[in-house]
Amino acid sequence: MSHARFVHLRNHSAYSLSQGAIRIPDLVALAAESAMPAVGLTDTGNLFGALEFSQYCTGKGVQPIIGCQLALPSRSDKPGAPSEPMVALARNETGLANLQFLSSEGFLKGDPSDPAVLLETLCAHADGLFLLTGGTRGPLFRLLAEGQEDQAMELLRALQGSFGDHMAVELHRHGLPEEAAVEPGMIAAADRLGLPLVATNECFFSKPAMHEAHDALLCIAQGRTMAEQERWRVTPEHWFKTPDAMRALFADLPEACDNTLMIAQRCAVKVSTRPPLLPVCPKVNEGATEEETLRAMSQDGLRLRLERMQADDETRERYEARLEMELGIIAGMGFPGYFLIVADFIQWAKEHDIPVGPGRGSGAGSWWPGH
């Protein structure tokens, strides 16, 4: 079966919180229906949907492209200017690890409501990533729109110095007058440094009919009304267009559409499930395993409770049988260390007169004799 000659690389799912309106199953289904061999997920600042996306793509026979819309702090002179997005796509496992680091860094070191990473941090973690320059909202576009060509070239050279040939200048055609005005400068800048062009459509919703509902979503997120003009909004063209529609839109630059397939071929990694990485409890009885320590603590705690209750033999047998069943389940799931660590928290809290219960869903407090 022949595949489409265009791949959507820029897609915001519902995990682009209060921005995207495409559910991941729908995103993958749209790609499959369009015969796209691959499709990208580039949520704003996070990788929350990466595992779900990988699993749905695998089920539909579509190659997942794991990405993230990262942002650089704005260098604009305008007060209150928002951060400026760029997009990083994972090419391999190393890139995926760097993408996870950069996403976390944005929340840890930046404003959680508008996470951003420094240019130096982005460049230092370029290994295994493919970079898109951010299109209409990116820093390259803004610099060229403001006539700062020297600064724009300086930015591109810095990025090329770290990403090499694993980057492309991103072009958008959402019908905005400024896009048409700045595009020649974008193309010229790419030509000067020998960088490829790539056509993307930043997709926030699946169909044109969803534009008004999506605009209402943006208003809710910003605490604004739809009648207000001075707010962030997207155009009716920010939908998941068909490959034929994108080819027609960029008919004068077919190589920009061809390059979406080239990038897809370079980005062959997906997120896989793995067993839980549970911590090892440092407080284990000498010469005993975690399970043996847990059993000893549990049995001691139950014995003290039954003594307080002055329980008869029948009650003792019933509770002891129940304890053995619970311990068998915990051991079978590999969770003894987890319960020991939670029990340690609870014991410390009680010793310091801090009110604490057994914890929702956790029986760790049940084995503390002082409970």
Image (cartoon, helix red, strand yellow):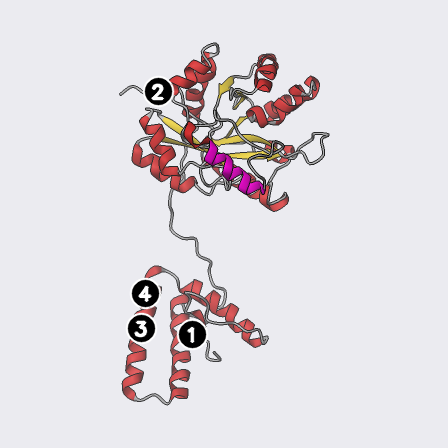
Query: Callout 2: few (<14), some (14-19), or many (20+) C-alpha neighbours within 10 Å?
Result: some
98 left or right of 307 in image: right
* Amino acid under disc 4: Ile
- Closer to the camera in the image, 20 or 211: 211
* Amino acid under disc 1: Ser
Magenta segment: does it hold 215? yes
Reading the chain from its start, which is encountered first: label 4 or label 3? 3
Reading the chain from its start, which is encountered first: label 3 or label 2? 2
Reading the chain from its start, which is encountered first: label 2 or label 1? 2
Q: CA distance from mark 4 to mark 2?
A: 50 Å
- Closer to the camera in the image, 293 or 166: 166
Marks 3 and 4: in contact by CB < 8 Å?
no
Residue carrying label 4: 329
Q: Residue at x 48, y 12 (%)?
A: 253
Quarter of the figure with the N terminus: top left
Q: CA distance from mark 3 to mark 1?
A: 14 Å
Query: Callout 3: few (<14), some (14-19), or many (20+) C-alpha neighbours within 10 Å?
Result: some
Above or below, comparing residue 354 to residue 33 in the picture: below
Residue carrying label 3: 324
Residue carrying label 2: 4
- Closer to the camera in the image, 340 or 27: 27
Reading the chain from its start, which is encountered first: label 1 or label 4? 4
